[in-house]
Structures are given as structure tokens and as C-alpha cells.
Image (cartoon, rainbow, N blue to C red):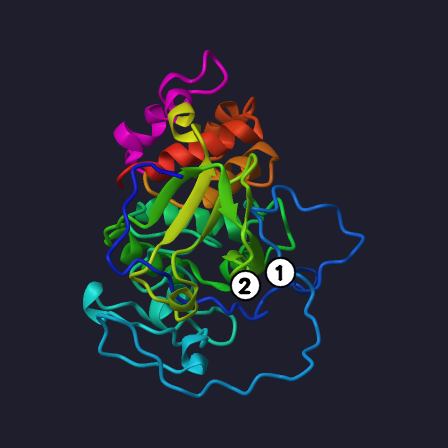
Amino acid sequence: MTMVRAWVPACVLAAGAALAPFLVPLTAQNPSSSAPATPLPWAYPVNPPPQPEAQPAAPDTAEHRLPGSARAFTRKQVTDFFNPPDWYPDDHPAMPQIVAHGRSPEVRACGYCHLPNGQGRTENASLAGLPAAYIVQQMADYRNGLRQSSEPKMGPPANMLALAKAATEEEARSAAQYFSKLNYKPWVRVVETKMVPKTRVEGWILVAEKDAGQEPIGMRIVETPEDHERFELRDSMSGFIAYVPLGSVKKGEALANTGGSGKTLRCSICHGQGLKGLGNVPFLAGRSPSYLVRQLYDIKTGNRRGEWSPLMREAVAKLTTEDMIELAAYAASLTP
């Protein structure tokens, strides 16, 4: 197993999942057995149908703590859509109302999914450091039905679509201005490998199966929390590990920097040197590779067709799934 441009904090792990079915359409909660196969299921994880428990687990009422935080939260508090845990309040400026608490009952707190410091998670977007105008435009695209997921059964994109329709323009601007002023920190450790831990889908993410062994990676990206327990506690200081196929980073670098003899365009033309962003165009460096693949795929299939999407259509038209994986692996391996 060869590590590629790896970075991970000493306490790299990840917090909070337990996404309840709030705002998720019925089809997202209980996928029909007759539904078409999920496109790129490793990039669009869909929860399996719930199974009845032989013996329901006793509620966890204990207070939990994290290294480096003086705070304590119960599981119930951790999964409160309108008061998400802020383990490290000194790590970011004061949050506006919409980020810290949302607006019950329609708009959950932005900080619940995207975390108080905007680092985000594999099932949604990292917002820290994105241009405010870009975030506002994405909210408008969601609201106007121009940005949808290629996998409607995946809960978080469905939630975002409903939330954006309910949020006011002022709420969107307030959140955008807050997140745009934050610094995005290295968050994903990219590892090239032939073999990966066996995983299952839980809470719309891939979770490593304990003591289940390994399997060939094939042509996919397997992105999972460094530490699932801290992920479930919504630890905003803990990141992710992304397993990618051997050689994919180097191939992605060549494709991004040359355009692959007409297969695509040089990414830096729009996304800037080192893919660190340019003007209102978002940065790609260090972002979740499974998230990046979803965006490339959504644009190619026409499910993401907002105001700025036409600029990407030419770039993605000829890309194969392998190309998308390589580009995403390369981008994720870069320092933000």
C-alpha cells in the first residue's frame, strides 16, 4: 500500500453521522427493489432498507467527549438538526443563526451537515473557503431545480434540494458569507492501493467492516472516515481516508495539466494554479474525491445544469469513469 501526498492531523478522525430521514423523500429511505441500479454506488452510497432489530438497543444517554474539546454531548444532542454540536467553538468565528440553528421546522442548521468550521463530510460538500457568490449561486440552482443528483435515492442531496427551496435568499447569503471567510484545512488522506477494507453503507457513507478483511479496489474510490466513532460524534477536527487505484494520482495529474490531447480542458484554466480556485470558480485541491466524482458525473449526465455548469460541459463530455476517478484522486491529493 503506497501513500500519496498524505496528510492527516494527529487526531484525524471524523464526526457525526446518524442522518435521520428528515426531509428525505420516501424513495430515499426505502429504495424499491425494482429501482434501477445505482450509478457508481461507491460515489453515491444509498442506505439499505431498514431491518427489524431482534432486540432494540438501549438508548445511549451517556455524555461523550473528544480530545482537545472541553465540551460533552449525548448522542441525542449530537443528532439535533437545529442545535448541532460545536466541539471547538474557538476554531471559528461566531456562527450566524442559520448556520448554528437553522430555522425549524423547514431549514436545519447548515453546521449540522457541513460542520461549524465548514469542513464538510463525504456525503455533502466542504464549504469553508468557497467564494460567497459561488455558494449563493448553488443555493439558487438548487432552489430553481437546476442542480439535482444522478442518484435521487441518496439522502443528503435530496435533503439539500428540499432545504434550499425552503431557505430565504437572506439566509443563503448569511451562510455563504460565513463559510467563505473560513480557511479550508487539509481533510482527506489519499492512499493508492490494490486492496481496500470491505465496506458497507451506513448513514449515506462507506463504513469499513470490522474484521471483514479486504477486497480488490477495482476501478473506484473508497472514501471512509479515519475513525468512525468520532465521525458519528460529528468531530469537525477529524478527516477522511480515500483509497484510490494505483497510479491514479499521476494519471490524473497528466490529464488535469494537459487536457489529455483534447479529451478535456486543462483544469487550471478555470480552477487556478494548483487547483486552488480562481475568482468565483471553486477550489478543487484537497476536496473529497468521491464528492468531486459526483459533481463530474452529475454535470455529464445533465443533472447539474446551473448557471455556471455550461462552462464544465465541454470539459466532462468525453470523460470516462476512469478519467473522473483519476482527476478526483489527483485533486484530492493536493494541498488546499
Q: Are marks 1 and 2 in contact (CB under 8 Å)?
A: yes
Q: Which residue is mark 2?
A: 203
- Which residues, given as a range, are shown in magenta? 253-281
Q: Secondary structure at mark 2?
A: loop
Density class for disc 2 (Cα within 10 Å; few <14, some 14-19, many ≥20) is many
| x, y percent for residue 138 | 45, 47
Nearest the camera: 137 or 183?
183
Work out whether residue 158 can be spotted. no
Nearest the camera: 255 or 166?
255
Q: How many marks?
A: 2
Asked where in the image residue 120 lies, by quadrant, the reply is: bottom left
Q: Is residue 311 magenta?
A: no
Type of amino acid at the residue the image marks with label 1:
Asn
Q: Quadrant of the C terminus?
A: top left
Nearest the camera: 281 or 225?
225
Residue extending farthest right: 34
User: Which residue is painted at 57% across and 32% down in the image?
Assistant: 300
Asked where in the image residue 278 lies, by quadrant, the reply is: top left
Q: Quadrant of the N terminus?
A: top left
Work out whether residue 129 can be spotted. yes
Asked where in the image residue 93 lies, by quadrant, the reply is: bottom left
Type of amino acid at the residue the image marks with label 2:
Gly
Left or right, 171 with reference to 54: left
Q: Give the vertical position of 40 relative to 167 (above or below).
A: above
Q: Which residue is mark 1?
A: 47
